[in-house]
Amino acid sequence: MAVGEGNGKVLGLITQNDIMRACFEGTLARQTLQEWLASGFARAPESVLQRITLRPDTHLRDVAELMVANSMAGDCACHHVIVQDSKGQLQGVVSSLDMVKCLCSPESVIWSKHPSFPDMFADPDDEEALVSMRVSEVMKYKEHVFTCSPGDNLRQAVRVLLATGQNSCLVMDETGLHGIITPRDIMRVFCDDVDTSMSCDVWLSDQKISLARRIVESDARVVDAADAFAEQGVDHLVVVLKGTSEVVGILSSLDVLLRTKMRNPTMRPMPLWHGPSVGEVLSQHPFLTSCRNVGTTVADAADGMLKAGRTSTLLGIQGKPPIILTENDLLRAFIDGWPRNSSVESWLQATACKDPKIPTYLEVSPFMHLTDAAAWMINSAELRRTCHHLVVRSPSGGLLGVFSSLDVARALRTLRSELDKAKLGLDATSVDAVMKPLKTVPSCKPNDSLKAALSKLDIFKQNAAVVSGESIGIITPRCALKALAEGTSQDTSVSDWLKQQPDQLREVVSGSRLLDVAAQMVEHSLHHLLVVEAESRVCVGVVSSLDIVRGVASIIYSFPFASLAWLRSLEMPCHFSLQAPFPSQSRANKVPRVEAAFLSDLYR
């Protein structure tokens, strides 16, 4: 449905996918169309109208090619085009189903008279090709179709549709097919104010169109399938093997158009979530760009990091490029017994293992997307060490700040869309899916000295050690910062140290949502949290900000492992395809994408 003003100007297009998205986002039914188009969630707002607008005299061939092109791009309403005359007046909206009804009906006037028909599906001398074309030649195979369980609720089914960018989801279990859910079905759910916590099986059993009427055999003619589309008023049919109930695929009106002038069915690429850019995160948190003089003392550097809630700082050297100092550097200074009132510069000069230069592979552009920055952080780790920081440089080479693993969690908190959360898996992934089990984390005893406990972090190349005993606790590099800032002795016992620390919420309950875990880390500027059982309070693992980074980094694959947690949880085989973007390339070729954008107000 086109949305326009009284003067005939078109403001946007509302499709059934918009209704489905509104249902998922929890949009109130009384929200106006204009408010929806301006919300940023609309499928075809005014900004993309030019890409989907055609004239009344456009050949059907060109209409089909535009729909196919938009479908392959995957970033606008690919199933519809708006028709306007030369004066900009709206003439109507054409959908992929309208196209199929016309092109696949031999009785239609278009079949014999429209000038664009002869080369739509076949060579000019083969006008019978479309008549003989079979569903199996056009359908989307089962391996490329996502599924959900009959016991899953409607909201979970909507998540499958939105997160995968597909317009159909098979409801299946080990007993076979129970039904199919499409955006048109979800539109009825929204309009009828159905509770989305209702199970798919219960909702399907109450629908007027039976499953049998939404099935077509694989050897049926495409023209016959088009008749079924029109008769049932649906955009999708389930394809079964002839004479059986075995599901082999799905046929949609768009699948028919995707076959236009092509010899093989084409899959639309999986939409990926990129998140905000590193520069956008830095602009929202000015303290990320703080820089200190290299002459500052070790204690002052530690105190500065604590007050800013940071794990690193930039140090300025007269006449030389700035260097980066992290909490792990100060941890080693504490272990080595370096005087807290000595300058950082003297410590750097005396430490042979410390190279003050910032490695070029840790430098990134402010235009780099969050997913790419997370992947870069993981791939940049040196042997047996983790990488928690990236240095952000402007296009002119100036330093803009330091981007840490906790900043990834900060960026996740800015997500305003339920769909963005679903694509990342934050709404369905628990802390248990990403945490490090207790047996893989170093431990220390309450009577160990603070130096001994922190030494274990350096030895095992870990940033957390669990304190075993009657009461649990955790030792991290932040403890070294506090000890340096406060002048605490190396010989202080771990138990005495923990007693001196203010009460902080350093625990999360097993099963907590990952989104809530990220929020807790950001609120208290903590990189590590203990994961405990709800009733017994027994520690079962540790979750870090870098664990969240690994989940975000996985999005550079066709679909993130975290977002597939809800698919793996089903009690049945799930049909989907995954493809890693770097199957056999060397590290040198694993260069993240950099968006060629210009943020003029941000970097002047």
Image (cartoon, rainbow, N blue to C red):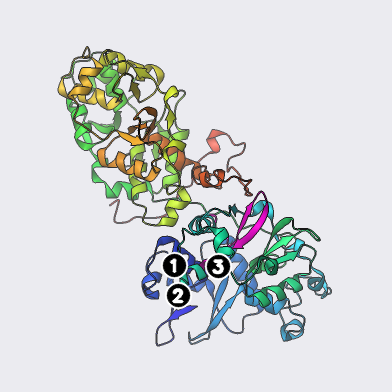
Q: Is residue 397 left or right of residue 147?
A: left
Labelled disc at residue 12: 2
The kind of residue tagged 3 is Asp
Q: Residue 324, position in %: x, y?
A: 30, 31
Labelled disc at residue 42: 1
Does residue 143 show up magenta in the picture?
Answer: no
The kind of residue tagged 1 is Ala
Residue 447: quadrant of the picture: top left
**Helix, strand or loop for disc 1:** loop
- Give the distance between the C-alpha atoms of the residues marked 1 and 3, in whole angstroms: 19 Å
The magenta segment: 164-187
Q: Is residue 401 at all visible to an observer of this figure?
A: no
Is disc 3 surrounded by few (<14), some (14 to 19) or many (20+) residues within 10 Å? some
Residue 502: quadrant of the picture: top left
Labelled disc at residue 185: 3
Q: Nearer the viewer, residue 195 or 430?
A: 195
Location of residue 150 with respect to 516 vertically, above or below: below
Q: Nearer the viewer, residue 432 or 119?
A: 432
Q: Residue 589, position in %: x, y?
A: 55, 38
**Helix, strand or loop for disc 3:** helix
Earlier sequence position, callout 2 versus callout 3: 2
